[in-house]
Amino acid sequence: MEVNDLPESARKEIFEKLVAAQDANMSVPQSRRYVADQFGINLRQVQQIEREGLDRLWPPLSDDQPPHTETPSDQTEAA
């Protein structure tokens, strides 16, 4: 099954569970394995959903968070 075969609502649920697992102090690799096992998908699919969620700022990332704006302290000086 391809990731795009999953409805967006299912992909968002998977992403939310992934973020929640990481917020609960699970490492990134552990959280990916956990979510893959929980939803019966493979790690590649989890990573694709993770990327899509990050790119689209899916909840919980979009909940009450202002968009990031670059500040001078974010910039690195060229040596």
Image: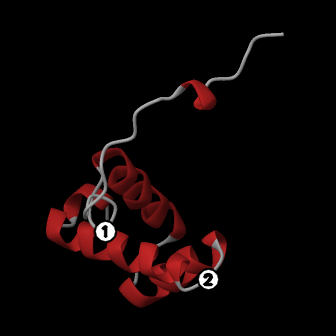
Residue 21 in picture, x, y percent from top left = 50, 82
SS at mark 2?
loop
Q: Is residue 49 left or right of residue 4?
A: right
| Residue nearer the viewer, 58 or 30 | 58
Kind of residue at disc 1 = Pro
Please tell me how many numbered marks the rendered image carries.
2
- Looking at this view, name the residue that lies furthest to the top: 79
Work out whether 48 lies above or below 23.
above
Residue 24 placement: quadrant: bottom right
Q: Which mark is residue 25?
A: 2
| Residue nearer the viewer, 58 or 39 | 58
Instruction: Give me the residue at 51% from left, 29% from top.
Output: 71
**Placement of the C terminus among the 4 image quadrants:** top right
Q: Is residue 19 visible?
A: yes
Q: Is residue 8 left or right of residue 24?
A: left
Kind of residue at disc 2 = Asn
Residue 33 in picture, x, y percent from top left = 57, 79
Work out whether 21 lies above or below 44.
below
Instruction: Give me the residue at 21% from left, 61% from top.
Output: 5
Residue 28 in picture, x, y percent from top left = 62, 70
Work out whether 21 lies above or below 32.
below
Q: Is residue 7 visible?
A: no
